[in-house]
Image: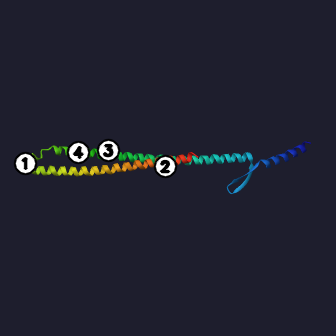
């Protein structure tokens, strides 16, 4: 009776195994595995895919942070150059104010050569001031363009995020 029960149990076991197998694809081949093993393998595949997706997402975010950091650094350098140019204009204005405060008629009467030298210096300063103002104008235009582009990118990024996150 025991042999008959064991044979019957083996047959049931083979039927359960056949019923509990699941066919999954591994590479180019299809393999029949017990359902529990197939479920474990599928879970591991999902974890791996999730890990890969998160790793790629994190790498993309890091690249974006690095790019944003570089942009902030560039903008800071541009701001420093702008402030330096502005200080140059202020210094030139102070020097020109000194020239404007001179009693030119007295200097011309007493030392015409010195008067000519002072007028040349004044004209040179006026030329430097015009150059500095032109440079400031270009820098202002570039900073305005940069702000507009930055805002447009933020809007684009927000739109992409909303499309991705909101079904």
Lower position in the chain sequence, tag 3 or tag 4: 3
Q: How far from the left and from the top, in percent, is residue 46?
A: 64, 47
Q: In the displayed orientation, state which residue is furthest to the front.
A: 167
Lower position in the chain sequence, tag 3 or tag 2: 3
| Residue 162 shows in the view | yes
Question: What is the number of the mark on residue 109?
Answer: 1
Mark 1 neighbour class, 10 Å CA radius: few under 14, some 14 to 19, many 20 or more: few
Mark 3 neighbour class, 10 Å CA radius: few under 14, some 14 to 19, many 20 or more: few
Helix, strand or loop at disc 1?
helix
Which residue is identified by label 2? 156
Helix, strand or loop at disc 2?
helix
Q: CA distance from mark 4 to mark 2?
A: 44 Å
Q: How far from the left and from the top, in percent, is residue 155?
A: 47, 47
Q: How far from the left and from the top, in percent, is residue 12?
A: 84, 46
Q: CA distance from mark 3 to mark 2?
A: 31 Å
Helix, strand or loop at disc 3?
helix
Which residue is identified by label 3? 83
Lower position in the chain sequence, tag 1 or tag 3: 3
Which residue is identified by label 4? 93
Q: Quadrant of the N terminus?
A: top right
Task: Tell me whether the residue at label 4 lies in contact with that at label 2, contact meaning CB atoms closer than 8 angstroms.
Answer: no
Q: In the displayed orientation, state which residue is furthest to the top.
A: 2
Q: CA distance from mark 1 to mark 3?
A: 41 Å
Q: Nearer the viewer, mark 3 or mark 4?
A: 4
Q: CA distance from mark 2 to mark 1?
A: 69 Å
Residue at (20% x, 46% y) in the render: 96
Lower position in the chain sequence, tag 2 or tag 1: 1
């Amino acid at each position: 009776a025991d042999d008959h029960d064991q044979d019957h149990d083996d047959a049931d076991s083979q039927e359960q195994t056949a019923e509990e197998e699941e066919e999954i694809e591994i590479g180019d081949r299809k393999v029949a595995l017990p359902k529990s093993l197939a479920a474990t393998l599928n879970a591991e595949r999902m974890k791996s895919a999730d890990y890969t997706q998160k790793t790629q997402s994190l790498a993309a975010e890091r690249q974006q942070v690095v790019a944003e950091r570089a942009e902030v650094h560039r903008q800071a350098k541009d701001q420093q150059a702008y402030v330096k140019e502005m200080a140059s204009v202020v210094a030139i204005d102070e020097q020109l104010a000194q020239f404007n405060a001179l009693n030119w008629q007295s200097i011309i009467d007493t030392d015409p050569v010195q008067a000519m030298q002072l007028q040349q210096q004044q004209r040179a300063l006026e030329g430097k001031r015009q150059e500095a103002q032109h440079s400031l104008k270009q820098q202002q235009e570039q900073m305005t363009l940069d702000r507009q582009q930055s805002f447009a990118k933020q809007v684009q990024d927000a739109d992409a995020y909303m499309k991705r996150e909101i079904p």
